[in-house]
Amino acid sequence: MSYLTENLKIEILMMIGFGDRMRTQTEVAALFQRNHPDLPPLNRSTVSKIEAYYKTHGHVRNIPRQRPQKVTEDTKLNILLRYEESPITPARQIAREYNLCKKTILKILKSAGKRPFKMTPVQELLDDDSDRRVEFCESMMNFINDGQILPDWILFSDEAIFTLHGEVNRQNCRYYAETNPHWIVEQHTQHRAKLNVWAGVIEDRIIGPIFFDETLTGDRYRHFLENTLTLRSLQDEFYHRLALCQEVNGAHFEQLINNNK
């Protein structure tokens, strides 16, 4: 495409047309060949690139490529010091600050033995969560040993809340270090709910998923246990002897629910 001057590119754009009078890329290539039989033939890809470049930049001028800027040792040292202070700084941000390209920043980090690591989001834990888990395990073992509950009767359930804001995009987050720092970020998944999704497992069956469009309150959760769960998934005789294993949640433990166990 190096033989295409600025005037020839403008001519190609005029051949493409506008509105209802636009030609296809194949038609433009054929018309260009008829008008300029002494030039190498165009292909559809070249026409598409010229059109896309014009839409992006607003012109079709041939801009000479600049030589890569040399990076001094002091600049490299300053960049590495920045990452020592803040290893999660995006490479694109550092590139803008030092008027360099992103690839140059990544090469500097690689030469220093630093690699990009993704973060791992985990559920936020409260101070008394560990004690509650131990108490639950001890209680369940006692129930099973006494024959009050059989493992096959337990319906293990959980919920997930999907939100439209407040979540971290892991794809755009990197931690640059020589060794994996196992970077984790606690997720507040119980706040600002947009959609609740419930699912359960009992014996070898998966129950659900079941969706709650509204905030899960005590009334809605009781209606779900007494009606939706029974009608959709479980037989009546099995439903009355199951043990429901659920997470700690305000709607689960409202007085309204506890009085109707």
Image: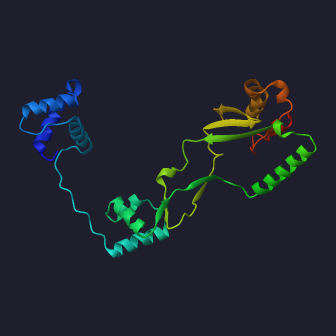
Q: Is residue 215 visible?
A: no
Quarter of the image with the C terminus in it: top right
**Front residue of this view, candidates 155 and 189:** 155
**Residue 57 shows up from this direction:** yes
- Name the spot of residue 250 as percent of width and height, x first: 75, 43
**Residue 226: quadrant of the picture:** top right
Say which quadrant the N terminus sits in. top left
In the picture as drawn, the residue positioned furthest to the left comes out as 38
User: Within the image, what quadrant is residue 215 found in?
Assistant: top right
Q: Position of residue 147 (x, y in %)?
A: 92, 41
Q: Position of residue 249 (x, y in %)?
A: 74, 44
Residue placed at 85% from the left, 26% from the top?
Answer: 237
Q: Position of residue 21 (x, y in %)?
A: 20, 24
Q: Is residue 183 left or right of residue 171?
A: right
Which of 55 and 236 lies nearest the eye of the viewer?
A: 236
Seen from the viewer's position, the closer of residues 55 and 144 is 144
| Coloration of the structure image | rainbow
- In this rendering, the count of numbered labels is 0
Q: Residue at x 91, y 40 (%)?
A: 148
108 with respect to 167 (left or right): left
